[in-house]
Image (cartoon, helix red, strand yellow):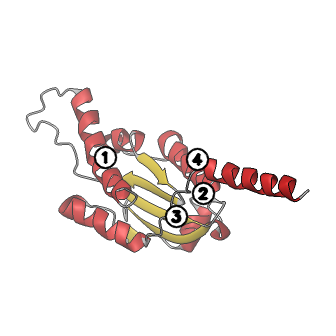
């Protein structure tokens, strides 16, 4: 009987080890992420209106119980589309936060009023997550259209915009490497 219990215990112990060690949970203050993003963009960082909890709940449709930390800044005027949102979700709620941010991104692309010059930026905004952290990046230097009125390659514009947004994504991801 003792041998059987000992064997069962050893098997259970080995089964637990077979999954390997769990990844350590990364705990980052989102203020550090935001500061690094702003430092990366410097003068190309355009969001100027800080979002509050009301904005998070009413505009982003994110419940306060889903969020441990929230930072959001966006345009003060409708001429701009620039936004940066960084969220640390509470345990078990990151999927809800991501779903709400995906819906917000869909809303921006399909329903919100955007000036034509902002549409390529809005269409290519980047949503990224790592663990319980989620970031929405829609900021960076603006594409410079030819001042002489000549044609430009739209692919070059899109590639430029994506590269600008990728800067923020890369900074975000650097906190989890």
Q: Sequence-wise, which precedes: disc 2 or disc 3? A: 3
Q: Sequence-wise, which precedes: disc 2 or disc 4? A: 2
- Label 1 Cα crowd, 10 Å radius (few <14 / some 14-19 / many 20+): some
Q: Sequence-wise, which precedes: disc 1 or disc 4? A: 4
Q: Position of residue 91 (x, y in %)?
A: 63, 65
The CA span between labels 3 and 1 is 24 Å
On the image, numbered disc 3 is attached to which residue?
25
Please report contact status of discs 2 and 3: CB closer than 8 Å, yes or no: no
Q: Residue furthest right?
A: 1
On the image, numbered disc 4 is attached to which residue?
103
105, 77: nearer the viewer: 105
The CA span between labels 4 and 3 is 27 Å
In this rendering, position of residue 11 left or right of residue 160: right
57, 118: nearer the viewer: 57
Quadrant of res 13: bottom right
Q: Which mark is residue 94?
A: 2
Q: Position of residue 83 (x, y in %)?
A: 39, 58
In this rendering, position of residue 22 left or right of residue 177: right
Q: Quadrant of the N terminus?
A: bottom right
The CA span between labels 2 and 3 is 14 Å
On the image, numbered disc 1 is attached to which residue?
166
Instruction: Mark 2 vs mark 4: give the one in front.
Output: 2
């Amino acid at each position: 009987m003792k041998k059987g219990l000992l064997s069962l215990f050893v098997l259970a112990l080995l089964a637990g080890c077979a999954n390997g060690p769990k990844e350590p949970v990364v705990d980052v203050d989102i203020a550090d992420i935001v500061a690094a993003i702003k430092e990366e963009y410097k003068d190309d960082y355009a969001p100027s209106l800080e979002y509050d909890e009301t904005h998070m709940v009413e505009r982003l449709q994110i419940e306060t119980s889903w969020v441990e930390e929230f930072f959001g800044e966006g345009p003060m005027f409708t001429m701009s589309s620039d936004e940066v949102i960084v969220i640390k979700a509470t345990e078990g709620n990151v999927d809800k936060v991501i779903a709400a941010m995906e819906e917000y991104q869909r809303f921006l692309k399909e329903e919100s009023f955007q000036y034509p010059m902002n549409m390529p930026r809005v269409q290519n905004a980047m949503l990224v997550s790592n663990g319980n952290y989620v970031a929405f990046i829609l900021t960076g230097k603006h594409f410079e259209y030819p001042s002489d009125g000549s044609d430009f390659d739209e692919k070059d514009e899109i590639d430029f915009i994506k590269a600008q947004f990728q800067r923020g994504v890369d900074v975000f991801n650097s906190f989890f490497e």
